[in-house]
Image: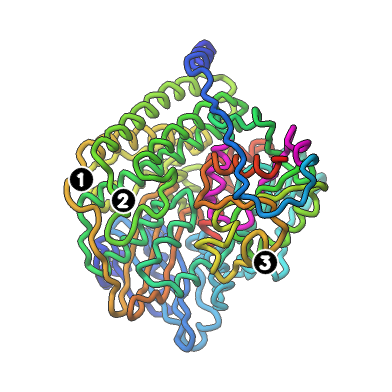
Amino acid sequence: MPLRRWWERAQSVPGAPHARGLAVSVDEWRQVAQDTAAAGGVLLSLWIAREPGAQAAVYAAYLTDRGVLLAELVLAGAEEATYPGLETIFPAASRLQRAACDLCGVRASDPDQRPWLNHAAPYEFVRVDGEGVHEIAVGPVHAGTIEPGHFRFSVVGEKVLRLEQRFGYAHKGIEQRFTELPILHGHQLATRVSGDSAVAFAWAYCQALEGMSAVAVPPRALWLRAVCLELERLANHLGDLGALGNDAGFAFGLAQFSRLKENLLRAVSGAFGRRYLFDVIVPGGLAVDLALDVAGSLADTVRAVCAETRELRDIYDAHEGVRDRFRGTGRLTAELAARLGVLGLAARASGQAHDLRVDLPCPPYTELSVAPAVQQGGDVAARVAVRFDEVRESGRLLAHLLSALPDGAYAVDMTAPAEAAFGVGLIEGWRGPVFVALQAGPDGSIRRCRLHDPSWQNWPALEYAILDNIVPDFPLINKSFNLAYSGVDL
Amino acid sequence: MLQTLRKIGSIGLVSEPAPAPDELLRVRRALDARIATLLGRALCIRHVDAGSCNGCELEIQALSNPYYNLEGCNLRFVASPRHADLLLVTGPVVKNMAAALQRVYAATPDPKLVVALGDCGCTGGVLGQCPAVLGPVSSVIAVDVAVPGCPPSPVRILQGILTAIAG
């Protein structure tokens, strides 16, 4: 059955024009996945909802040309113990299924039954045998200022034969905590799923809540949200471009880009009262407005930062040593990126021309005509080039957004939905698509909140990108992806 | 190369003076003031993320940008707790990181200092009530200075570190 037929059978989700949902039988569960893959769609997220005394249900969200297709499989009888896994169709499903099992006790049919979030249970890494093969274990505490995670390299000499990642160290139980919060307060926790993507997660959460409540967010608030999202993209890209120069032995790059990032953060602080845009996006709009003169000086800083970035791009491009370290390193081919269902920035660097701001835009992106940055190389150089292109494009968008902010209110009052309802949020964060599926209970409660970072899909791709590279290039390759830990450990 | 040198020359020095210590951030004074002052002449810092959202990490990284002149304050980040005098700990401590944090603490030679960073590190913060969280940093290891904020700015972080070593 072609994907179109599932799409037609599915029902629309209130307030989410790009999403549809359908209930499927256990026989149809894998068929939907297969038809999605055949049509070029990818798995966006997979999770299980299990409430005390009720039947568990497993959900899969697919990102297709038409929009987000949600499949729900209510688990009854024999499936309660084991449901059919999707890992052979979408490899990223494996870790999602293992994590869901640790949280809910419901297993997929995946032969890999090792725990993921539960670190109390024993864990066996896959061993590589052969003459001269040895293992290097790194983490959870790393040498640099980064989040906790474990990398197990099997190497011969300096060459990497295999990398296996082990995460869950930053697991806090965020999704369970959501069920204890009033739905109107959930955005504070969503903001802190992954601090570097605070805007993307808060917006996606608010979008889901506002959609189910049929609240019309004022245009000024939507434009300001886009300002925040592009500022977040800009800040992260500037940080990464500096760190990537540094990892290639070019300390000048770190000094310059970290200075530019600081200039930007200080301008953001002057505009919004905080350097990182935590708790700025709230249900109904924004927590603060932007004064006209402040918008002007913020635009000036953005323009100056982008102009200097163009200058630094020339220096990076002309630097023999930097070029040598970037080119051909950590290559992820277009075929592999498609097979693994890689998302966002990493996918665009491997020839996958997808950007939600173009493909499934929400207001105000519907009026903005974003030019997506696409590179074919799939190596560190390509991921650097995508960042440079996206800095330029965000600079262009910010100049437009800040000069033409609509007048009017920056927020409207929100009341919590009185009855059970369902909403979906989907935002192109700086790493890629950030997805929220929100189930409201009665009287402003939350029954289930699923939050998904694209790092779920992209971490396994890093295990491939490192193959046949040398161990000392791992920090560079890893940074070129710069994936989330807390954002997936939840 | 010329372009690089020209850029360095045109930007010049952007470093700003260090902030003064703030005694309000101090939780306890376990070290003799003379030892703390001696450590302050060349202090090595090891960062540990015990379960944060990564917001605090962004601001710790910002501390290394040219504005804050970290090494000019005799401070430097090191790659191993065995080389460290001070642990800079972020996040509420989660179950899956408690053992690693305790091992890092044990591996850090005495005399040592601990600075808990961010609302989560100080009190648990917004993430403190999550079911797989044990509690603030002080629930697992002894804390000398606590720097609140979500996330705290680089100036506040620097102030916290300088408070820990103020005689």
Q: Nearer the viewer, mark 1 or mark 2?
A: 2
**What secondary structure is marked by label 2?**
loop
User: Which mark is in front, 2 or 3?
Assistant: 2
Under tag 3, what secondary structure? loop
Q: Is residue A300 left or right of residue B10?
A: left
Callout 1 crowding tier (Cα within 10 Å): few <14, some 14–19, many ≥20? few
A86, A277: nearer the viewer = A277
Residue drawn at (44%, 71%) of the image: A30
Residue at numbered disc 2: A288
On the image, numbered disc 1 is attached to which residue? Answer: A367
Chain letter of the residue carrying label 2: A
Precedes in sequence: disc 1 or disc 2: 2
Hey, what amino acid is under mark 2? Val
Callout 3 crowding tier (Cα within 10 Å): few <14, some 14–19, many ≥20: some
Where residue B54 sits: x, y (%)? Answer: 54, 51
How far across and how far down the image is residue A133, in percent? 78, 47
- Whether residue A489 sits left or right of residue A226 in the image: it is right
Residue A233, relative to residue A59: is it above or below? above
